[in-house]
Amino acid sequence: MATMTNLILIITGFLATVSTIQAASYTLKFYNANAAATVYTSSRELIVHRNGRVAQRIFMDQDLRSMTHYEEIAHGFKLSNANGEEIEFVKDLDTAEFSLFTIARRVRDRSEVVTDCVRMTGSNWFGGPQQKYQYWPIQKLRFNEYSFLTKEADNCAVADRYWLNSLGSFVYVHDETPLFVDQNYGQPGYMCLEAKKSLPYDIYDDTYSFVYQVGVAGDAKVAHMAAVGNILGKPSGHPAEAMVKYPIWSTWARYKRDIDQHVVLEFANEIVKNGWPNSQFELDDDWETCYGALQFNTTKFPNIRQTISDIRAAGFPRVTIWIHPFINKGCEPIYSEAKRLGYLVADHEGNTDTEWWNSKTGQAAYVDFTKPEVAQWFTQRLQAVLDVSGIDSFKFDAGETSWTPPNPLLNGPRSHQPNMIVDNYVRTVAKFGELVEVRSAHLSQDLPIFVRMIDKDSEWTWNNGLPTLITTLLQMNMVGYPLVLPDMVGGNGYNDHPPNKEMFIRWLQANVFMPSIQFSYVPWNYDNETVQISKTMTSLHEQYTPQIMERFKLAVSDGYPVNPPLWWISPNDTKAQKVYDQFLLGDDIISAPVIKENVRARDIYLPIGDWVDGNTGTAHTGPKWIRNYSVPLKMLPYFLRKKA
């Protein structure tokens, strides 16, 4: 539908409408729902309505005003200018519950920059990238020409291009778009999606495309489930139940790289002696002869198979080991062999030099998983690790695009570089079974494995501290990754700053209704009270493992989040939308941990429904606030939906 001066033409047997634009508006009408998307060329606004309410406003680029011709095409319309540039507006899905359409600039010259700005004011927003300052809702975040890729900076290990608002509308930007984001810079209250041919994306093609989709439904829950069903995808399976039910004990935070046969056996025996049998033992950093060798350092581990056997005998039926995708210079002969065979990521000049946290600048290389023969080679080397040691599976670290050399030359469409390295890496390693964990993700919502939160710091603050344990959980669930592995209890203790007793306990409590619990710092290093509280919390987690597994199954069958935000059960509840320190397990359990230092009481919000206090048995009917709820150090507040 268009408001304009029309010229009707018959072209090869069908009726085409072509017009010259005169300050026009154009509408995509969704006939199975009371929804429409209208673009106004004079104000450059795209406004999406549903049931008489504005669900989305996008302020489009100046190129919209250059469009002088209108043409109806299948399921939509196309605007074009004298230079042959086009913008397509096309309906993808039109049902009573959900409407979806695409805005596509399929060819733009490499010299051009195109920016469409999504209005964030007037609603709450969810999704976006994983960040150190993981604010929730996400409209508080600030970005300035932020390349939207997985990267080490800002803990951006998960960066799927999906944003959902509380009015029931989302924006999803396609992977081939070289996307930069400005949020609350230049245009306060807007998130500007900027497409340009610039590093770290491919800079060699003459043109690029800028394509995104907008979905709208009756509320945010319906919209998100439609996004899962039509765009994001759902996991094809889930991790092992034992990995959920019983804790994982990692050597990393407690010992860092100071591990050997004696240390790991002593650690294993301590864990069982203090009352945690049947757990998973994870051997972390510095077991190789050199980084990338994938061979055991026999000085540290003279007989690795016997060591693993002894760990099992101590009471650990599952043992995993840390893996990274790098080979350091000087790690011979494997470094020279991999370089000679072309198995390392190189830039366009053939340089493979990069660095990571276990190398000096320019003294490492990233294995090129975009080449099928390299992925197979790496897989065979990993299998050899299992065969030699008797270990069950792996913890896979890193993988983000920023570890490649600048301007990498990868094996695949240039429009998908450099993001493809992440997807190829995690798909290669996901084949090692139901104990696998990765920390980076890109378009890999279908994989049946845990995605681990990137390392958290032992802090109480929003700077990657305890509050972000919850908000990162929510962020990952709301971009389609429901199989979340929280980072280690108490954080990683970087900069000689390990967690104190209170932080350790509050962190563990926050973790109870998440999918799994990882320890490295240990409760018996504090006092007996900490041990007893920790046993109570791990037992509570074990008690509710059936509910976690049931939600895993729903994630696989229907794409439901495992730990949704509080608003999930009442999508239009504006109070629930703003809650950042509570979360759900499924639809029937609310966790409300204390995440502030020296706090022994907190306010708790209960959304609509009948709820029972898991500690006292007291019944409540929401929506309501419980003010100044007493929370002694030993307590985790949680509420269960009252059974009918």
Image (cartoon, rainbow, N blue to C red):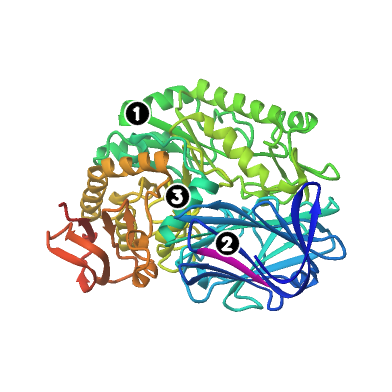
Q: What element carries label 1?
A: loop
Q: How far apart are marks 1 and 3 (CA)?
A: 22 Å
Q: Distance between the residues labelled 3 and 2?
A: 56 Å
What type of secondary structure mainly makes up the magenta span? strand
User: Where in the figure is residue 339, as x and y percent of width and height?
Assistant: 77, 33
Image-based side of 604 in relation to 18, left or right: left
Q: Quadrant of residue 443?
A: top right
Does the segment drawn in magenta span residue 337? Answer: no
Q: With respect to residue 393, does 53 lie above or below?
A: below
User: Counting other residues with Cα less than 10 Å from the Cα at mark 3, is it few (<14), some (14-19), or many (20 or more)?
Assistant: many
State which mark lies toward you, 1 or 3.
Answer: 1
Q: Residue 29, labelled with which disc?
A: 2
Q: With respect to residue 223, does 294 lie above or below?
A: above
Q: How far apart are marks 1 and 2 (CA)?
A: 58 Å
Res. 543 visible in picture: yes
Which kind of residue does numbered mark 2 sit on? Lys
Circle 3 sits on which residue? Answer: 253
Q: With respect to residue 366, does 126 lie above or below?
A: below
Dot 1 or dot 3, earlier in sequence: 3
Between 40 and 614, the one lying in front of the other is 40
Q: Residue drawn 21% across and 55% down?
A: 640
Between 254 and 518, the one lying in front of the other is 518
Q: Quadrant of residue 279?
A: top left
Between 135 and 106, the one lying in front of the other is 106
Circle 1 sits on which residue? Answer: 317
User: Where in the figure is residue 118, as x and y percent of width and height?
Assistant: 60, 69
**Count of numbered badges drawn on the protein:** 3
